[in-house]
Amino acid sequence: MNVRALMAHRFAGLTVVSAIVIVLPFFFPSAYYYRLAGLVLIFGLAAVGLNLLMGFAGQVSLGHAGFLGIGGYSVAIGATYLAAPPWLCILGGAALSGLVAFCVGRPILRLKGHYLAVATLGFGVLVTIVLTNEATWTGGPDGMTVPRLMLFAWPVHGADAWYWIAAITFLIGGTLALNLGDSPTGRALKAIQDSEVASSMLGIDVSYQKLVIFVISAVFVSIAGSYLALFNGHITPDISGFLRSIELVTIVVLGGMGSIVGSLLGATILVVLPQTLTVLHEYEDMAFGLILMGFMILLRQGIVPSLMGWFAGRRS
Amino acid sequence: MTILETERLSIGFGGVRAVDDVSLIVEAGQVFSIIGPNGAGKTTLFNLVSGLYMPLDGRVRLAGEDVTGLAPDRLARRGLSRTFQNLQVFFRMSAVENVMVGRHRHERTGIVADLLHLPAVDRQNRRTLEAARGALARVGLCDVANQQAGTLPYGALKRLEIARALASEPKILLLDEPAAGCNPVETRELEGVIRSIVKDGVTVVLVEHDMRLVMNISDRIHVLANGRTLVEGTVAEVRSNSAVVEAYLGVHGAREAGRAVG
């Protein structure tokens, strides 16, 4: 297998995604579908970020919605109180999330498995509490309105514009993640997931690598959070809540650990399914739960890895 | 030249001294074997030397420098590598990817280059892949290079760990029971591999239960029992030492063995 063939292979999934992203709007009957697809892509971007941490490095986080919150409120507060342009607030929020991830990650990434899960959970809860209580800045539990995104003096409005922005950002994020997978850093992270002892014995600075990927992961999620706030035009502390964090983890696991296309598929299911299940009225949540369980029982490694394994098995 | 030295090294777990006052000197280019009955503290000694455990007492020196308490990745960057008795393979990666990880300390691209997949990353990947293939060839695993490590048989995994350690181009290589689970043919092949490693100027420290292998290739043998040094010497000296025979067979067994020979 030469390097060029590997390259083609690496981006095969994302190429299909780009094609679908371009063709899909032709089949949208109304703006509502743009909105739904935009949400899928934004949550997909956040899930790719979490997937870098969970799927590549094997470290769990139950508090990643905290970074959604930091990204979202950076845009809201920055534009409202500092009169900063929203695009600058997106970058500022990403930098702030990276800094927070660095400070939080240093002590807690030493923990493993369940202990790390509980520590990250604590982080998410902490962010929510701060966002709820600092009402003078954040508007408290009722949240605040978020000004519109200005792109080179053009105000971005309409779900279709957001669809394209989210799509381009998702594709860039996915490309970066796939690049990382096929690099010295990516190999080191996958090694850490399988054996930290052997990794360190081969000269890998395990805690440094975990910290770097935690920071990058936070930046991805933060940008998704900023988009979410700008897209909705309104933000409440729920954005960083525990349920949001669980949702992100669910998307990653459902789509497949380490699979970028999987993260988008997972996001599709978690965003679209509840909308289609409204026909079931009071049984909606129950059906949603059962479908999630069904997916995990039938495709226990997540959708993409399980299907790929199934096809590989059939071909040989 | 002395490459590795431990000085009165000790560690205890819950009151039991697993390694107690062990001093040894390994000369560069040697095959230095550590033997002893189960529970003698051989693997614990390896864990101390390779930085996985912090010694309670004593020093470790690598090429003359005090490295006591240094983290494993720091030691690896100074040229110390090891394999594990209870396999520490990256099971979800292919065989060749496992060995590619071994090249980590020689890889030079940074995180930004990796994210953007700059041309330097391509070149780096190619060099890493080439070196990894070379290391796989040395242990005879070329034909399973692209197989997932989790699907390989035990003996192959043992050799995969050696290839991975070799890929890091160590000055000193610690092998923890490389022949465990190998059949006689595989053990003979392993002996050839170890010889070729030594010929390249790498010092080998070996923990092994296969006495034929140990006696064949060792320059010096250090015998441990209950965490303490029993004797150290050349193959001939250790073989003729009655204390060693007793440690393995017990006093009664040794008497029986002596009677049988006599």
Image (tube, grey):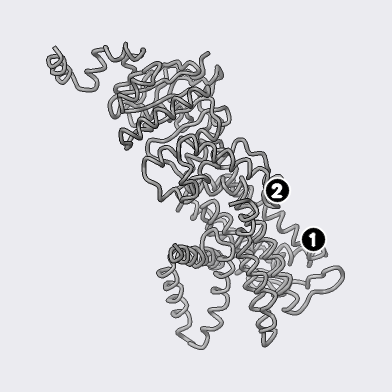
- In this image, B25 relative to A157: left or right? left
Q: Which residue is mark 2?
A: B112
Could you say whether the residue bearing mark 2 is in a helix, strand or loop?
Answer: helix
Which is nearer the eye, B60 or A88?
B60
Q: Position of residue B22 (x, y in %)?
A: 39, 18
Q: Position of residue B92 (x, y in %)?
A: 47, 51
Q: How many marks?
A: 2
Is residue A37 shown above or below A74?
below
- Quadrant in the rendering for residue A172: bottom right
Q: Residue at x 47, y 39 (%)?
A: A197
Q: Residue at x 47, y 18 (%)?
A: B5
Residue situated furthest right in the rendering: A153
- Quadrant in the rendering for residue A125: bottom right
Visible in this render: residue A143? yes
Which is nearer the eye, A147 or B202?
B202
Visible in this render: residue A132? no
* Dot 1 alpha-carbon crowd within 10 angstroms: few under 14, some 14 to 19, many 20 or more: some
* Chain containing mark 1: A
Q: What is the C-alpha distance between the residues marked 1 and 2?
A: 21 Å
* Three-letter amino acid code of the residue under disc 1: Leu
Q: Residue at x 59, y 56 (%)?
A: A52
* Dot 2 alpha-carbon crowd within 10 angstroms: few under 14, some 14 to 19, many 20 or more: few
Which is nearer the eye, A97 or B99?
B99
* Three-letter amino acid code of the residue under disc 2: Val
Could you say whether the residue bearing mark 1 is in a helix, strand or loop?
Answer: helix
- Callouts 1 and 2 on one subunit: no
Q: Which residue is mark 1?
A: A88
